[in-house]
Image (cartoon, rainbow, N blue to C red):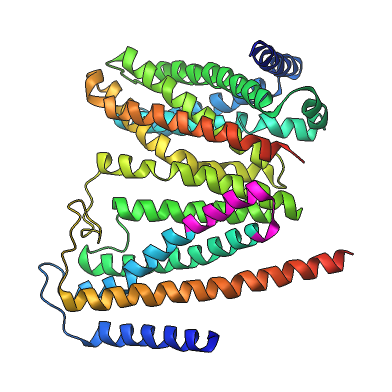
């Protein structure tokens, strides 16, 4: 089962990479071939948000039960989320260079991902500043929740300040998906592939951190 | 309920008394404010600066002076090792409320001082003073709400001084962006109706953060 899972993830992602680069793409005004970034950039941003929500969820579970394994899951999700957040920023800013003319121009979308990066950074800084395992778990969970509840305010604030130039998100205001069928298939496959990849690495990461924790307990005895 | 208010009052008065004894925060913050505003004054020189930029400078001074003062409230309990005694004498919610009120009073005194000095030394022209003061006060309450819980978190960590701005900035950013925009518009003399949206965001931010802080503070405070 486990081997099958790994090969399936490998196959899906290879397929997406090849299809995303080779297959013809319908002509989209002002985007053209640059729209191909969608196959990679959107799944990255999606996972960075999913990982953040997962990290929050496990933080709440930890505070409720004081079960250290929840904190380990919360921390692993945050680490992976940070990685995918960096990937989303990098792919997005490469695209921005060729579509908007500069790598970084403080578009509302760029500002919000920048804040997500800052929150992740602050969370790791806090964790490294506390020694006791249980206290580290408690305080970083509290911080993750405080940061998590203030994030949604950006949805209301950003549109008031500047208009975004970012192409319509997949789930847009009208609730419709404006995408060519062949593109949609590749895009959904990519989303599936990267989500499966994320879940697999998340599983590995959690087990690894769990082993490290048990080892540190043994050494302490 | 009566007990609750009484205990909050006692925690608050205890902080006021210990502050008046040492005057550590007041003295260092007063100097900090003076230094910051003089730097701004010397940087400006004889230039005529637009009011929009002055609003930004005002909020920079407020943010950094707040980060000097507000972070102290819980750190000082850890440094003087009085937190265990405090834990025994009141419930977490009472302590949090007392500290929050103390921080509010401190920031209000400080920020109005900053504002007065700011108006005196730069040619800051506020066209709608009533709206400006109310937006500034709302912003202050939000700033204190978020800072108090973060001060409680960092008081247990190792590198307290450097950690505060790192942790508070992403949490405060929604508030700061809104309040800077609102004060900018208020100083330009806009009608209150036109920044109703900003005021709603400020109020809801403050309510959400205080509610979450009250719920989460017991987890930070326990040992």
Q: Position of residue A96 (x, y in %)?
A: 27, 65
Instruction: Identify the image quadrant of the C terminus of chain B.
Output: top right
Q: Position of residue A95 (x, y in %)?
A: 27, 69
Q: Residue A44 is drawn in which quadrant?
A: bottom left
| B1 or A209: nearer the viewer | B1
Instruction: Identify the image quadrant of the N terminus of chain B.
Output: top right
Residue A131 visible in the current orientation: no
Q: State whether the magenta stretch is mostly helix, strand or loop.
A: helix
Q: Is residue A149 above or below residue B179?
A: below
The residue under the point 57% across, 55% down is A58
Q: Position of residue A198 (x, y in %)?
A: 47, 72
The residue under the point 56% across, 51% down is A122
Range shown magenta:
A52-69
Asked if residue A55 is among those painted magenta in the image, a careful observer would answer yes
In the picture provided, is B25 more to the left or to the right than B86? left
| A28 or B36: nearer the viewer | A28
Residue sticking out furthest to the front: A1
Q: How many marks?
A: 0
In the picture provided, is A65 more to the left or to the right than B32? right
Residue sticking out furthest to the right: A221
The residue under the point 26% across, 19% down is B192
Q: Is residue B34 above or below residue A67?
A: above
Asked if residue A72 is among those painted magenta in the image, a careful observer would answer no
Q: Position of residue B22 (x, y in %)?
A: 75, 19
């Amino acid at each position: 089962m486990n081997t099958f899972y790994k090969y399936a993830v490998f196959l899906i992602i290879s397929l997406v990479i090849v299809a995303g680069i080779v297959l013809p793409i319908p002509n989209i005004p002002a985007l053209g071939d640059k729209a191909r970034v969608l196959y990679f950039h959107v799944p990255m941003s999606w996972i960075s948000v999913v990982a953040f929500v997962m990290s929050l969820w496990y933080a709440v579970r930890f505070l409720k039960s004081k079960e250290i394994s929840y904190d380990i899951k919360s921390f692993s999700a945050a680490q992976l989320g940070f990685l995918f957040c960096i990937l989303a920023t990098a792919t997005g800013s490469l695209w921005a260079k060729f579509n908007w003319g500069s790598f970084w121009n403080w578009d509302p979308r760029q500002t919000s991902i920048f804040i997500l990066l800052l929150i992740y950074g602050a969370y790791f800084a806090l964790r490294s500043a506390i020694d006791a395992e249980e206290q580290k778990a408690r305080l970083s969970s509290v911080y993750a929740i405080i940061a998590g509840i203030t994030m949604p305010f950006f949805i209301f604030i950003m549109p008031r300040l500047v208009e975004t130039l970012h192409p319509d998100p997949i789930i847009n205001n009208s609730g419709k998906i404006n995408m060519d069928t062949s593109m949609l298939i590749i895009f959904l496959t990519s989303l599936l592939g990267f989500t499966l990849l994320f879940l697999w690495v998340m599983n590995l990461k959690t087990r690894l951190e769990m082993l490290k924790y048990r080892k540190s307990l043994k050494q302490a005895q | 309920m009566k007990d609750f208010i009484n205990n909050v009052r006692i925690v608050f008065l205890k902080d006021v008394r210990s502050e008046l004894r040492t005057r550590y925060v007041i003295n260092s913050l007063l100097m900090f404010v003076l230094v910051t505003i003089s730097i701004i004054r010397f940087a400006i020189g004889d230039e005529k600066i637009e009011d929009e930029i002055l609003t930004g400078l005002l909020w920079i001074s407020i943010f950094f002076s707040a980060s000097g003062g507000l972070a102290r409230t819980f750190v000082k309990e850890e440094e003087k090792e009085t937190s265990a005694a405090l834990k025994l004498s009141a419930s977490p919610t009472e302590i949090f409320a007392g500290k929050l009120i103390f921080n509010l009073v401190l920031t209000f005194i400080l920020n109005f001082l900053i504002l007065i000095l700011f108006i005196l030394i730069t040619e800051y022209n506020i066209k709608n003073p009533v709206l400006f003061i109310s937006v500034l006060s709302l912003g202050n309450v939000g700033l204190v709400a978020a800072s108090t819980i973060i001060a409680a978190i960092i008081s247990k960590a190792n590198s307290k001084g450097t950690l505060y701005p790192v942790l508070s900035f992403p949490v405060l950013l929604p508030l700061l962006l809104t309040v800077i925009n609102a004060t900018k518009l208020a100083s330009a003399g806009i009608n209150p109706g036109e920044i109703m949206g900003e005021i709603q965001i400020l109020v809801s931010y403050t309510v959400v953060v205080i509610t979450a802080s009250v719920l989460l503070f017991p987890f930070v405070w326990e040992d």
